Amino acid sequence: MGNRPRQIASIYIGTIIGAGFASGQEILKFFAVYGYKGIFGLIIATLLFILVGGIILIKVYNDKIEGYEEIIKNIFWGKIGGIIELIITSFLLAGFCIMLAGSGAIIREQFNVSYNTGIYIMALATFLTFMFSVKGISTVNTLLVPILLVGVIIIGGMVIIKEGFVFSNYKGVGITNTGNFITSAILYASYNSISALVMLSSIRVLIKRKEDCIQGALFGGLGLGVLSFFIMVPCLIFYSDIHNIEIPMLKISESVGGKGKFIYTFILWFSMLTTAIANGFGCIRRISSFLKINQKPIAIVFCIITIPIGKMGFSNLVSILYPIFGYLGMFIVIFMILDFIKNKKRNP
């Protein structure tokens, strides 16, 4: 894999692996709840990540896209496109604030430091990255994503070696809704597609050939699949102990010793950072484009005004905002796939 596809794959993974993903909460709710069938759900989600990532990147390359608003206006028409674009910008703002809140929560819990200090540290780290635009985002993700991959594989692998494939939730718990592991996988991939759309549509400068799109999406999707697997299996092993815990993987990492929890704390914080960067940059770039103002002053104001919102609390923000944007993501993905098929027929 060349340097450009590696950068693209790293940005893709870094965008998706946020607080919900790395904490194990999303994997638990979307997959582990279905027992061993959840593993098949992960495979479906991985294939969808590859497909959606490839469609976005190829469209960016073919149409010389510079931002997600161009894709939205291309797929939807008139006021519908404008409304969806506004909702996505709101999603980015909310996502950034959720990562600020998550940083405050984890630093307070693990290091006995004030909640506000954790928020300020995340705001400063993202601001410094924004100052270097796409180059800064590429550098941070290229450095941190391999650390995240290795860290999750080591912790997850140690749990599996120690405990074996003995699942406390093998068949799946009694689920009252009508969903199954297939629909859950589709919803999960769709729910993450908004962040992917925003970030991948902003990195045309990294794409020189169509092969970069295909390889970036392939390795990005596979990387997410590997990360998911090494979170999913430990969640199945310890399901009965962690199904009601807010950060399941921190509890699970304790089983490999005190250092396991300490290491995973940093993995979780770094994953919040990469997602905060993706959401914040997408929002800043759109505001800058709309107001026709340089991104740097926008970044300064953005990082300052989001701090009070982050202080609302991690769990409050997640429970209110995530479900709303999940179904919007599914709606956008369906139209993107239809648009891709239409263009394929027009230009075989």
Image (cartoon, rainbow, N blue to C red):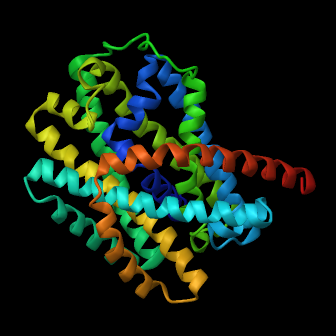
What residue is drawn where x is 27% and y is 44%? Answer: 151
**Residue in the foreground of this view, choosing between 223 and 176:** 176
What residue is drawn where x is 24% and y is 26%? Answer: 159
Q: Is residue 237 left or right of residue 319?
A: left
How far across and down, in percent of the image, does residue 274 sit? Answer: 38, 59
Q: Quadrant of residue 157?
A: top left
How far across and down, in percent of the image, does residue 327 sit? Answer: 60, 43
Q: Is residue 11 left or right of residue 119?
A: right
Q: Quadrant of residue 5?
A: bottom right
What residue is drawn where x is 31% and y is 41%? Answer: 23
Task: Examine the rendering and report whether any part of residue 15 can be seen.
Answer: yes
313 shown above or below 121: above
346 shown above or below 337: below
What residue is drawn where x is 22% and y is 69%? Answer: 120
Outermost residue to the top: 171
How far across and down, in percent of the image, does residue 66 sit? Answer: 64, 74
Q: Is residue 254 left or right of residue 87?
A: left
